[in-house]
Amino acid sequence: MKPMLLDELYQILKNVRVDNPICQYTPQKCALLLPYINKIRALKEKNNALVLAHSYVHSDIIYGVADHSGDSYELAKIAKETDSSIILFAGVRFMAETAKILNPHKCVIDPNPNSSCTLADSITEEDVHRLREKYPHHTFVCYINTSAGIKALCDVCVTSSNVYTVVAKIPNDKIFFLPDRYMGENVKQYLQESKIDKQFLYYHGKCDVHEKYESAHIDLIKNNHPHTMVIAHPECKKEVVQKADMVGSTSQMMRYVQQHPHKDYLILTECGISSRIQIENPQANIVGTCMLCSFMRANSLPAIISALENPSPSQIIEIDKNILIRAKTCIDAMFSYGS
Ligand code: 13P
Ligand code: SF4
């Protein structure tokens, strides 16, 4: 990757106009960030490192240093196919763990000093053991937002981009989904509407970011801007999802806006998607507020530099071999369903 020029960086990032100053870029801010960006670009080349960035991290990481950015499914697929010897994942811990599970012999680095995820943290391995004992005939489906240890105890992994289709395709008519209760409610509703007859149970975890969206927010915006298109992540509550014009993963949201760029949008997910849409589809008009995931936003350029130069043990992903093998079976089951 050749060095970036200041104007090149600013011309990309200046389009972010969402209402949180943390997300916005001035020429001065770009000038401060540029030396870090160029240092990372040189380190990547020197170390043969691939940088993957989830769409929720700061735009300077996505547009300055990432080789690929996207949703959990796309990034897992890229991690599965890469030749690079080092994978640095700017996201949260379960994403870096997924990259490691798919690349047991590669060095996978998580630079993030606060790599939690409220959904992944909402269930323990003991909980899953207890549930499996209680529901021995159910297929256990876990959202990708879970630790390697939880995946190792489940049968099929899903992401927000394929949860509806994979659950519908699973041959068992008894399914236990974990850990997101709102995604569980949304999938249950979809199965009912599609007349797919399954006993579909789910756990009570939740994402603190998506839980904050209320259907009243949609009414408020629609009262003032009646033609606003509402796009929502399936981690939102059922009453929010039911009022949305489109429901999907973060990358599916971006593709939807790309196909209909000349509209007003209320985007019900972390604000990184609004930033990316403003950069890549400047004709689209974003209305509404900006909600941040503090875990994703803990990723920073200086942390990426130190992780590439001299990763600390806490930044290098290590997973017990038996857990890794079982978690890989769970993720491979997802890939076997296609999508
Ligand atoms: P996506 O896979 O849709 O990007 O979602 C990941 C996530 O953590 C949403 O909160
Ligand atoms: Fe986890 Fe929610 Fe942050 Fe996504 S937005 S990483 S589900 S805490």
Image (cartoon, rainbow, N blue to C red):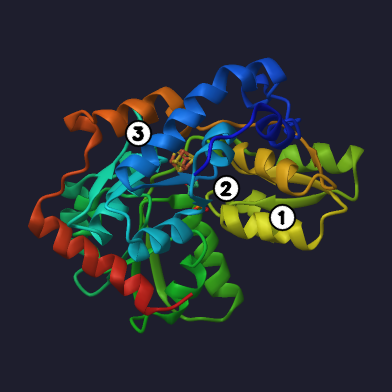
* Residue beneath disc 1: 244
**Label placed on residue 318:** none
Question: Could you give the CA–CA distance between mark 3 and mark 2, rounded to whole angstroms?
Answer: 21 Å
Determine the residue positioned at 91% across, 37% down. 224
Bin the neighbour count of mark 2 within 10 Å (Cα to Cα): few under 14, some 14-19, many 20 and up: many
Q: Earlier in the sequence, mark 1 or mark 2?
A: 2
Q: Nearer the viewer, residue 232 or 317?
A: 317
| 40 sits left or right of 212 in the view | left
**Label placed on residue 115:** 3
| 297 sits left or right of 115 in the view | right
Determine the residue positioned at 67% across, 15% down. 28
As shown in the figure, which amino acid type bears the numbered disc 1? Ala
Task: State if disc 2 and disc 3 touch (CB < 8 Å).
Answer: no
Q: Nearer the viewer, residue 117 or 103?
A: 103
Q: From the viewer's perspective, is residue 328 above or below residue 15?
A: below
* Percent x, y of residue 201: 38, 63
As shown in the figure, which amino acid type bears the numbered disc 3? Ser
**Does residue 83 appear in the picture of this structure?**
yes
* Residue beneath disc 2: 236
* Percent x, y of residue 173: 37, 80
Task: Judge depth for marks 3 and 1 and give the one in front.
Answer: 3
* Percent x, y of residue 27: 71, 20
Determine the residue positioned at 42% across, 51% down. 180
Question: Could you give the CA–CA distance between mark 3 and mark 1, rounded to whole angstroms?
Answer: 30 Å
Q: Nearer the viewer, residue 152 or 303?
A: 303
| 102 sits left or right of 299 in the view | left
As shown in the figure, which amino acid type bears the numbered disc 2? Cys
Task: State if disc 2 and disc 1 touch (CB < 8 Å).
Answer: yes
Dot 1 falls on a residue whose secondary structure is loop
